[in-house]
Structures are given as structure tokens and as C-alpha cells.
Amino acid sequence: MHHHRKSIALACALLIALGACGKPQPPDKEQPPEPQAQRSELRDAVQQPIERARQADADVQKAAEAQRAAIDAATGG
């Protein structure tokens, strides 16, 4: 008889636990989700080297133009 009570108690506990589970509510369509910090940190980590490379390329292009101008001035061309 004592074993029977434990089984009934366990069954009730399982039913209560399952009853608490429900369908998740869909996100509110009128309010956009909050941006996630991890995504922006990852984006920044990827974008920083790209921006440094673009700046370095611009610096190299300016230096090359200055060198061509100096060569043209020295050679009279």
C-alpha cells in the first residue's frame, strides 16, 4: 500500500510538471527584439581588422601617389 501512494504521488507530480509546460508565446511583432551584445561584439571583432586594413591600403595608395609625383618631379616627367 505504501508503494501505491508513492506511485500516485509521482504520477501527480509528473502531471503537474507537464501541465506547467506550454507552447512558447511568439515574439511581439510590434516590438523588435533587443540587440544581442554577443553579436555586436563579434561583429566589432571582425570589423576592426577590416577597417585597419582599409586604412592601411589608403595610406599605401597615398604614399604611392606621393612617390610617383616625386619621381615625376625628379625626372622632369
Image (tube, rainbow, N blue to C red):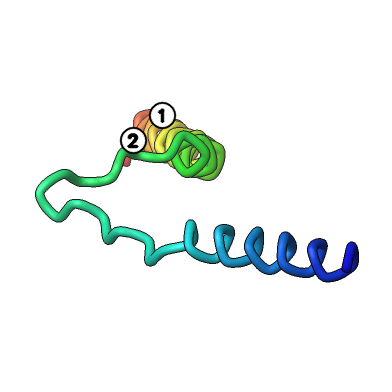
Identify which residue is drawn at 48% across, 63% down.
Answer: 19
Q: Is disc 2 placed on a helix, strand or loop?
A: loop
Decide: marks 2, 1 in contact (CB < 8 A)?
A: no
The answer to whether residue 1 is above or below residue 69 is below
Quadrant the C terminus occupies? top left
Q: Which is more toward the observer, 70 or 45?
A: 45
The residue carrying mark 1 is: 70
| In the displayed structure image, the side of residue 48 where residue 34 appears, left or right | left
Query: Residue 70: x percent and y percent?
Result: 41, 29
Q: Which residue is mark 2?
A: 76
Residue at disc 1, secondary structure: helix
Q: CA distance from mark 2 to mark 1?
A: 10 Å
| Residue type for callout 1 | Ala
Amino acid on which the number 2 mark rests in the picture: Gly
The structure residue drawn at horizontal position 63% and vertical position 63%, both measured from the top left corner, is 12
Residue 63, above or below 5: above
